[in-house]
Image (tube, helix red, strand yellow):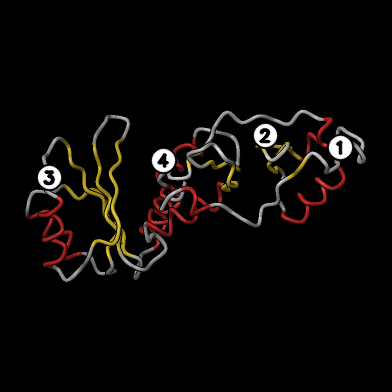
Amino acid sequence: MVAKELIDSNIPVLKQTDNVDRALQLMSECKNSHLPYLHDEIFSGFFSEDFLLNYDYDTLLEEIRPEMVELKIDSNLPILELIKVFSQTAFDLLPVFDTAGIFLGVIEKKEANERFIGALALNDNGGILEINLHNKEYSLTEISKIVEYEYAKIISLFLSSDSQNQMHLTLKLDIAQISGVVNSLERYGYDVVSYFASEPVTNIEKDRYDLLMKYLSI
């Protein structure tokens, strides 16, 4: 999934012939406090609701300088990189351009996060487990075979590191009963540091599961 597939065609684009009143109406209708601005069909920045409230309603947008955004998202930027960019900026909307530098539209942060979570199948039923890799060389092929031997499949995975630069591999499986998988991985020397099952879940495990899901959705 790449940036151009996440462009929201429902977000209106402001033009220099619009006035402040029109811009505020559009923001209210789409429930977005920022909207992109095109001057002579060229992307020139964003206008925010708070900023426009400082001007008379009949003031044309071409008379006001918009807030510029230095970031220009390439239409083929992978979603994982897009999520990274959003995490490094305060903007909830980012402009997307093709290889010729032509403005294609904008992507909303909320939509990008939801699509990313959907791609990882985090909302699907199943178990999640985390393996501490230490400095162990691991084989994804071997891990997959161990999981499949327990009649399970890996539906998503990702690597992360903690403050001590320890690497962790997080797996989302398609089954809720994952004790067999955990036991098999540990027999092969893998350090399973945490695991959560979607059903059933005890109260303590449910709290930890919710915390992990919240972390993964950032």
Q: Which residue is mark 1?
A: 60
**CA distance for labels 3 and 4:** 25 Å
Which circle's residue, 4 or 1, is located before the other in the chain? Answer: 1
Identify which residue, 42 or 154, lies in the foreground: 42
Q: Are marks 3 and 4 in contact (CB under 8 Å)?
A: no
Rounded to the nearest whole Å, what is the CA distance between mark 1 and mark 3? 61 Å
Q: How far from the left and from the top, in percent, is residue 59?
A: 90, 36
Residue at 80% across, 45% down:
23
> For mark 2, does the 10 Å Cα neighbourhood hold few (<14), some (14 to 19), or many (20 or more) residues?
some
Mark 1 lies on a secondary structure that is loop
Say which mark, if any, is on residue 45: 2
Q: Residue at x 47, y 39 (%)?
A: 99
**Residue indicated by mark 4:** 81
Going by the image, does 61 lie left or right of 90? right
Is 89 placed above or below 213 here? above
Q: How many marks?
A: 4
Q: Which of the two discs, 3 and 4, sits closer to the camera?
A: 4
In this view, the residue in front, 131 or 18, is: 18
Side of 37 where 175 appears, left or right: left
Q: Amino acid at mark 1?
A: Leu
- Viewed as shown, does residue 146 lie left or right of 128? left
